Amino acid sequence: MRKITILVPAYNEEAVLYQLHDRLSTVLNTIHSYEFEILFVNDGSKDRTLDIIKELKELDHRISYVDLSRNFGKETAMIAGLDYTTGDAVIIIDADLQDPPELIPEMIYYWEKGYDDVYAKRSSRAGETWLKKWTANSFYSILNKITNVPIQKNTGDFRLLDRRCINALKLLRETQRYTKGMFSWIGYNKKEILFDREPRAAGETKWNYFKLFNLAIEGITSFTTAPLRLSAISGFIVSFVAFCYLILIVAKTLLFGETVQGYPSLMAVILFLGGIQLLSLGIIGEYLGRVFNETKKRPLYFVDEYNNQKITNEEGQPSRRIGVGVRRTDG
Ligand code: UDP
Ligand code: MG
């Protein structure tokens, strides 16, 4: 029988876990043609999340968990989960029930039809402020204008991925991850289904505008070098204009002579050029920083525990392929 893994990254989710397990089980119990694994990735929670997962694991043999050594962020938690996924397909779902588990049968239906990536698109975003909706909207439209990889709007990480996609994603080991872009980048047969996003069932969102802004920069810089080109182009235009201006001034001085005026225009030009230079340097710095981070070739995460088993991370050199905390299949 084929196996499907339900992957749940969880960070401080004690308030929703029982509810999640209830709703998830209700759905999974209606599907008899597959075996299921519910894989929690505890992303260094500081509350009782891990205890609750362990407690649930006692009651439900389908549950397994990976406990990361600290909070690495959702993007890294997801790749850790994919590394430990044992199923033929994986369904990534948020712990807070904003992604309704009731959609799982539909995802499986399309998977059976041969799609490799069945992603759920939100047709509404209940419980989110207009500011968040607006910022999300403008971000996606900008991102889509400047990259060649089409990135789906209003789509989260809630999706079913075939083993082919899982293996592809496991090969992308960059440390600054923008998973949403990676889903598009790897390609394969995609199918969109629609749903209404519900407000969080309980607990609080882990995102604030600062984090979202960082994620946006991540998204732009990891999928396009367009900003670099932009800085080159604007640099070119500005120097061209400055050059014309220079000719103009020289000609004017030669023809009409010059008393000492020019201070305002001088300042204006200096400030303007200074600004352009700083901007370009900043953009270059952004990419340089990424190069710096990637050349370190650090493992993406460390695992503290996998299914009650302490992971010692001692398997020699951490393999770049499977991350660190290599799972021992015998235990
Ligand atoms: N999450 C995580 N690590 C983090 C932050 C979040 O694993 O550092 C998980 C979180 O437990 C939840 C999912 O990522 O299952 C989405 O988080 P959240 O609901 O806070 O984000 P939002 O829905 O507001 O975008
Ligand atoms: Mg949420």
Image (cartoon, rainbow, N blue to C red):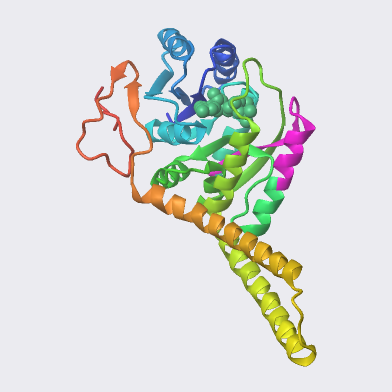
Pick the front one: 76 or 82 = 76
| Residue 35 visible from this viewpoint | yes
**Magenta region: which residues?**
116-138
* Above or below, comparing residue 312 to residue 51 in the picture: below
Q: Quadrant of the N terminus?
A: top left
In the rendering, at what x and y percent does residue 47 appear? 49, 12
Q: Quadrant of the C terminus?
A: top left
Classify residue 314 by image quadrant: top left
In the rendered structure, the answer to whether residue 40 lies left or right of residue 208 reads left
For ligand 2, the image quadrant comes to top right
- The residue closer to the viewer here, 161 or 296, is 296
Whether residue 33 is visible here, answered yes or no, is no
Q: Nearer the viewer, residue 268 or 30?
A: 268
Q: How many marks?
A: 0
Name above or below for residue 55 compared with residue 259.
above
Residue at left 58%, top 16%? 20
Q: Residue 113: percent from the left, percent from the top?
A: 58, 42
Q: Is residue 184 left or right of residue 48?
A: right
Name the residue: 59% across, 68% down.
232
Query: Which residue is farthest bottom?
Result: 255
Magenta residue check for 130? yes
